[in-house]
Image (cartoon, rainbow, N blue to C red):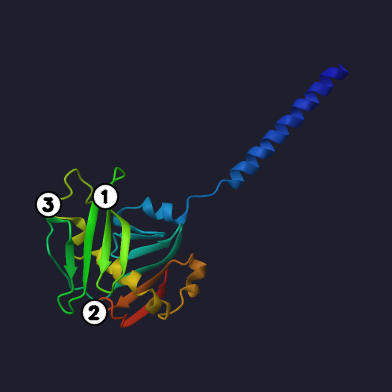
Amino acid sequence: MKNRFTLFSGILVLLISFQSCTAESEEATPNASELEEELALENKGVLKVEAITYIFKETGETSKFNDEHRDFNFKFIDELPYSTSTTSKHAIEGLTITNPNTGEYMIFSNFESMKNGFDQFDIELSTGQVLTSVLFKPGKANNSSNKWHDGWPIVEEPSPVIGAMIELSQQVSLSECGSTDACAEDGNNSTISLTNGDSWFGGIEDCSVECAE
């Protein structure tokens, strides 16, 4: 009888220990990152430049992430003028996007289609900055077996990719726009409204920070 009690006690202790470990394991399992949650939503495309990810939202805003964490959302108040050398898949190598008002440009080259649905390419800006192994994937609305039929989504008007390249080149100016720390209670879910003027890379003319409601 004593042996049975000892055996039962041992089994009970093991069960309690197992449940405790399971609960700790569940508590330690991290939730989906901010980036994963945003990627799960409908969007108009995703652009990756090294550790930075831009997600082009259906609302017209762009969400910027650094690694897995949201930096902020941004949008341009004024229309960004541009013209393209081509929208044809067969002549896309060396695609040049030009600012007709200033002559500033972006040259896209070394295109490669990846198995994960992304296109990889390099971008040279008229500032002299060169970005390599940039990744772009069209949003679900543009994601078809013949995505080139009506031209390349990256140059469709309005092109959020151009806005992302301008934001990337103007990070010093943006740091002077205003702190997004005021929106920390909202999970840094702030939106920066930008007025760029005629020039792409000449500097941000005006900006304001709005916290999520």
Residue 132, x across and y down, in percent: 32, 59
Q: Which residue is mark 1?
A: 140
**Mark 2 nearby-residue class (10 Å; few <14, some 14–19, many ≥20):** some
SS label for mark 1: loop
From what the image shows, is residue 169 above or below residue 27?
Answer: below
**Mark 1 nearby-residue class (10 Å; few <14, some 14–19, many ≥20):** few
Look at label 3 and name its amino acid. Answer: His
Look at label 2 and name its amino acid. Answer: Ser
* Distance in Å between CA atoms under marks 3 and 1: 23 Å
Q: Quadrant of residue 19?
A: top right
SS label for mark 2: loop
Q: The N terminus is located in which quarter?
A: top right
Say if mark 2 contacts mark 3, CB within 8 Å.
Answer: no
Looking at this view, name the residue that lies furthest to the right.
2
**Does label 1 or label 2 sit earlier along the sequence?**
1
> Is 29 left, or right, of 199 in this rendering?
right
Look at label 1 and name its amino acid. Answer: Lys
Image point (24%, 81%), residue name: 197
* Distance in Å between CA atoms under marks 1 and 2: 31 Å
Residue 127, x across and y down, in percent: 28, 74
Q: Which residue is mark 2?
A: 199
Looking at this view, name the residue that lies furthest to the bottom.
205
From what the image shows, is residue 126 above or below residue 152?
Answer: below
From this viewpoint, is residue 195 visible? yes
Image point (29%, 49%), residue name: 118
Q: Which residue is mark 3?
A: 90
SS label for mark 3: helix
Question: Of discs 3 and 1, which sits in the foreground?
Answer: 3
